[in-house]
Image (cartoon, rainbow, N blue to C red):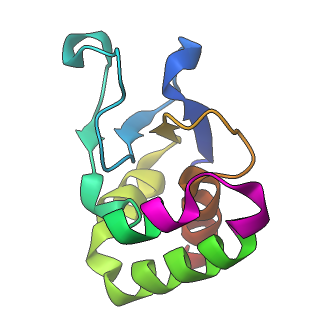
């Protein structure tokens, strides 16, 4: 099993292993040619309704995380490509949120680590 790390898409740091964009919406100002991706998985991201409710407000993060984990549990097939890639080696989850501590990639990484 490889490590699962998260990285902000705008950081321009080289990503390790299999690289997946885990946002529902393509990041602003980023051309598709600029990212070396093994996949874009918009369906693994929080629903539009949950994303809009959260609004990247840190005081809502705990409830957001709980609701997002419930969405992931309802659709376990969405994380299968990530778990399969982690079986083979390192995985990097790219996200575009400014807040590096309160975002869906943090919740998704923790969910994947528990699922292994």
Please name the residue shown 42% across and 49% down the image: 88
> How far from the left and from the top, in percent, is residue 20?
37, 40
Camera-side residue of 81 and 28: 28
- 109 sits left or right of 100 in the view: left
Q: Is residue 36 visible?
A: yes
Res. 98 image quadrant: top right
Q: Residue 17's x, y, as percent?
A: 46, 32
Q: Quick check: 5 above or below 80?
A: above
Compare residues 87 and 106 and report the one nearer the observer: 106
The residue stretch that appears in magenta: 52-61
Quarter placement of the N terminus:
bottom right
The answer to whether 17 appears left or right of 48 in the picture is right
79 lies left or right of 12: left
Magenta-drawn stretch contains 59: yes
Q: Is residue 1 visible?
A: no
Residue 11 position in % (x across, y down) = 59, 16
The image shows residue 93 at horizontal and vertical percentages of 49, 42
């Amino acid at each position: 099993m490889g490590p699962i790390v998260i990285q902000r898409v705008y950081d321009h740091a080289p990503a390790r292993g299999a690289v997946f964009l885990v946002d529902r919406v393509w990041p602003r100002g980023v051309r598709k040619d600029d990212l070396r991706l093994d996949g874009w998985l918009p369906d693994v991201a929080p629903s539009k309704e949950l994303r809009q409710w959260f609004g990247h407000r840190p005081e809502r993060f705990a409830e957001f995380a709980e609701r997002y984990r419930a969405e992931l549990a309802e659709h376990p097939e969405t994380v299968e490509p990530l778990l399969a890639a982690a079986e083979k080696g390192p995985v990097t989850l790219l996200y575009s949120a400014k807040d590096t501590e309160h975002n869906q990639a943090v919740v998704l990484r923790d969910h994947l680590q528990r699922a292994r």
